[in-house]
Amino acid sequence: MLQLLKTRFGQGRRTIDFPGEQTLPGRFRGLPVLRPELCRNGCSACAEACPTEAIQTSPLKLDLGRCLFCGLCQEACPEGAITFTDRYPLSFRTRDAMVLDGREVELATALDARMRSLFGRSLRLRHVAAGDCSGCAAELAALGNVVFDLGRFGIQFVASPRHADGLVISGPVTANMRLALQQAYEATPAPKIVIAVGACALSGGPFRGAAHSSDGVPPEIPVDLYIAGCPPHPLSLLDGMLRLLGRIDTNERRPAR
């Protein structure tokens, strides 16, 4: 026991300071930057390399809702018109805001005053894995460890939608999970929020167009927050949730350059 205590004290404080800038590994791919002025007329190498058709050219645009952050477009572009940064804020309030075109990026804004008064300091969420590969589920689970410590912000995951203030949905919503997701949504007491995480929940991801996939959260379930990634990093998830609750500057806009 003494040895265990000694080891633990030797580790020091492991919980990160957040909100605030964090240092991520060099291989991390965050918010991409588009420079349409570098595109050569007729060049479509980046679009051809994209496995989910997230990129269109003339003019250059990139749909973060479809992006797998694989980096193939960056490797294929001979002019460097697309580059991935280490910026982990990847949350948006609408799907349209996720389509990048080289102009400034509008990150997620906060809920209205009434919803913030209800959920701003105490939020209970039910995770529905609607056919995901467990990648997003693993990152969501990581939010509860000592490094990210989601509970310190008053946010917790619960076992039943009847005890929840909202849903977190991952996966493309397969045919076998669509009814279960709808029932979970209906069982969640109003008012409620819905957070869609990962490319699969946003657009179907690599399963878009599959016969047994809904291409993400179906339209009958309104989404309040979209968080991009495949899967999203825990920092992206934490940043998005806190923006939605008004705990991070909701007016922040950073130029995509």
Image: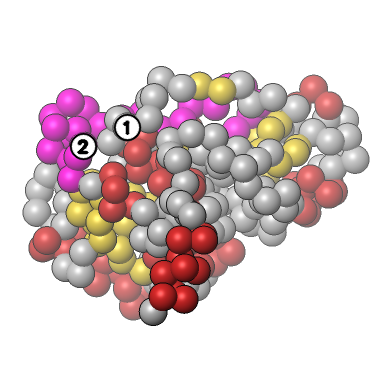
Q: Quadrant of residue 171?
A: bottom left
| 80 sits left or right of 51 in the view | right
Q: Secondary structure at mark 1?
A: loop
Please determine whether, in this image, residue 210 is positioned above or below residue 89.
below
| 206 sits left or right of 202 in the view | right
Magenta-highlighted residues:
100-122
Q: Nearer the viewer, residue 211 or 199?
A: 199
Dot 2 corresponds to which residue?
A: 120
- Determine the residue located farthest toward the right in the rendered image: 78
Q: Quadrant of residue 256?
A: top right
Question: Between disc 1 and disc 2, whose residue precedes?
Answer: 2
The location of residue 226, given as percent across then percent down, is 41, 45
Q: Amino acid at mark 1?
A: Arg
Which mark is on residue 247? 1
Q: Nearer the viewer, residue 166 or 55?
A: 166
The answer to whether one can see residue 192 in this image is: yes
The location of residue 96, given as percent across then percent down, is 47, 35
